[in-house]
Amino acid sequence: MAIRKIARMGHPVLRQPTALVVDPTAPEVARLIADMFETMVDAEGVGIAAPQVYESVKIVMLYTPEDAARPDDLRDKDLAILINPVVTVLGESLEEGWEGCLSVPGLRGAVARPAHIGYRALGPDGQKIEREARGFHARVVQHECDHLAGVLYPMQMNDMAKLVFTSEWKHFAAAEGLDETEGLGDGEADPENDQEKE
Ligand code: NI
């Protein structure tokens, strides 16, 4: 296993289309998954997608408890490893929430996304995974699967006034009357710690 360098916004690998994984049980897939996990843990993320470690294939992983409201609640909980995932929107309603991204260090932004989704994928054992997700779980799945289509969360934002440095978050939250501890996507959980990891 190895901690990989994380691609940052602007690198073309983050915009490229990704390839389907032909054999989820192949040894090279297992190695990539192990590296992604180690990289995500080292960077204190709650999810990661293969293009973020310069691999243009359809693999994401994320923590998935249904009841988690904040990234801190996700630690040491269920980890989903999704190969060739497909997301289906199951409801009309959109929910706005705050996201961060390991490829967009030092920032967080508000993104409106469908609140209720279904997703299908294969696991690393080749078995089918089929789930529904709401709330933060649904948000992280959509954020990670967007990476597989070359989409970063700022591209999904409709109000750039809500793109803020994590180091300014306390001031922003106070001025806007927001919960200072509000969750984010796969990025930094600690607003004080927005240094690059690599
Ligand atoms: Ni991300």
Image (cartoon, grey):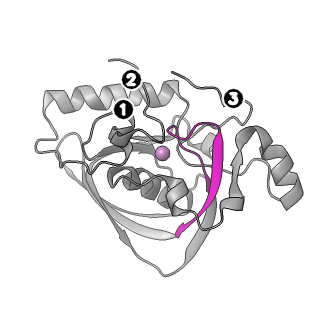
- Residues 74 and 2: in front is 2
Between discs 2 and 3, the one toward the N terminus: 2
> Quarter-wise, where is residue 160 in the image?
bottom right
Which residue occupies 83% across, 45% down? 170
For disc 2, the neighbor class at 10 Å (few under 14, some 14 to 19, many from 20) is some
The image position of residue 188, as x and y in percent, is 61, 37
Magenta stretch: includes residue 110: yes
Name the disc covering residue 53, or none: 1
Instruction: Please give the residue where the numbered disc 3 appears in the rendered image.
Output: 193
| Magenta-span inclusion, residue 109 | yes
Amino acid type at circle 3 is Asn
Q: Which secondary structure, mark 2?
A: loop
Q: Position of residue 140 (x, y in %)?
A: 49, 53
The magenta segment: 98-114
Residue at the farthest bottom position = 92
Q: Kindly state the secondary structure of the residue where label 3 is placed.
A: loop
Q: Amino acid at mark 1?
A: Val
Residue under label 2:
4
Disc 1, SS: helix
Q: Earlier in the sequence, mark 1 or mark 2?
A: 2
